[in-house]
Image (cartoon, rainbow, N blue to C red):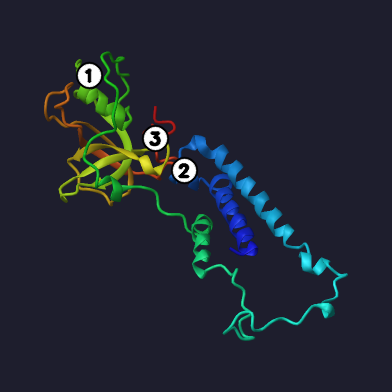
Amino acid sequence: MKRPLQALLLVVSALGLLHATVFTDLYLRYVKEGMRPLLIASGALLLVLGAAEAWSLRKPTAPDQDRGHDHDDDPAPDHDEHPGHGHGHDHDHSAPPRIAWLLLLPALSLLFYAPPAIGAYSASREAPKAVEVKDQDAFDPLPATSPLPMTLTDFTTRVQQDRTKAIAGREVLMTGFVTPDGSGDGWYLTRSIFSCCAADTQFVKVRAHGTPAPPADAWVTVTGTWHAGGTLGTGSADVALDVRTIKKVPRPTNGYTDALLPGAG
């Protein structure tokens, strides 16, 4: 690859990383929040390397510095040394293939077009089960607040593991994005969770009953009570909600966590 292209690729990649981490929160679509310092450091390093590479291109090449060399004393080139090669065979074999320019596309995408966040399309292709949660033998008493703010993971744990059945009849409040049922019948309130990055995304889902499905990927806050199905407090219990109210909300800044919205509890 030509050195000017190398320098350009380094600089554009650096600007893309810094744009996604310093000036916006686009990096949260790909990795966990804790990786932000490393991404900023990587962007700064790439910018320094790109600037150094660009600066080195200003230096004259070795043949230009060899001013004492008398080209008139050079022996005449032997045109017979390479049979079949005429005077027109003077192109640069070091030119990079045109496909090398495609390396710029991922870097430019961070600047001008960020891929959409993982949402209903991916979640609808996952089995309707929550992320793995640890077995819990004892639970703290639920606050008396009504509706009770809960994460989808906490609701799932209470429904399937709390043998005191404290969740029965309690009105809860949860937030997530809409995932249509793959069969076209019903929908799920969903949250996606990163373990490290987008490649290992898991989904936690709560089946919604009693209301038509809002548009896919819409973020909503719902209130409702546990939808009876199976034996509450055991693994047979349905992770489902009879929805009473539904309200559209903006997507949280970091939508790849199963956390309460600020001020929700």
Q: Answer with left or right where residue 255 lies relative to residue 189.
A: right
Question: Which quadrant, please, contains the C terminus?
Answer: top left
**Residue 181: image tag:** none
Specify few, some or many for label 1: CA neighbours under 10 Å numbering under 14, 14-19, or 20 or more. Answer: many
- Name the N-terminal-most of marks 3 and 1: 1
- Name the N-terminal-most of marks 3 and 2: 2
Q: Answer with left or right where residue 173 lies relative to residue 71.
A: left
Q: Position of residue 27 (x, y in %)?
A: 49, 45
Q: What amino acid type should be assigned to the residue bearing mark 2? A: Leu
3D distance between C-alphas at marks 3 and 2: 12 Å
**Residue 162: image tag:** 1
Mark toward the viewer: 3 or 1: 3
Mark toward the viewer: 2 or 1: 2
Residue at the spot 43% in from the left edge and 31% down from the top edge: 263
Q: Secondary structure at mark 3?
A: loop
Q: Which residue is mark 2?
A: 28
3D distance between C-alphas at marks 3 and 1: 25 Å
Q: Which residue is mark 3?
A: 195
Q: What amino acid type should be assigned to the residue bearing mark 3? A: Ser
Q: Position of residue 94 (x, y in %)?
A: 60, 68
Specify few, some or many for label 3: CA neighbours under 10 Å numbering under 14, 14-19, or 20 or more. Answer: few
Q: Position of residue 214 (x, y in %)?
A: 26, 49
Q: Secondary structure at mark 2?
A: helix
Q: Name the quadrant containing residue 7.
A: bottom right
Mark toward the viewer: 3 or 2: 3
Question: Which quadrant, please, contains the N terminus?
Answer: bottom right
- Name the N-terminal-most of marks 2 and 1: 2
The answer to whether residue 147 of the structure is visible from this angle is: no
Q: Nearer the viewer, residue 82 or 91?
A: 82
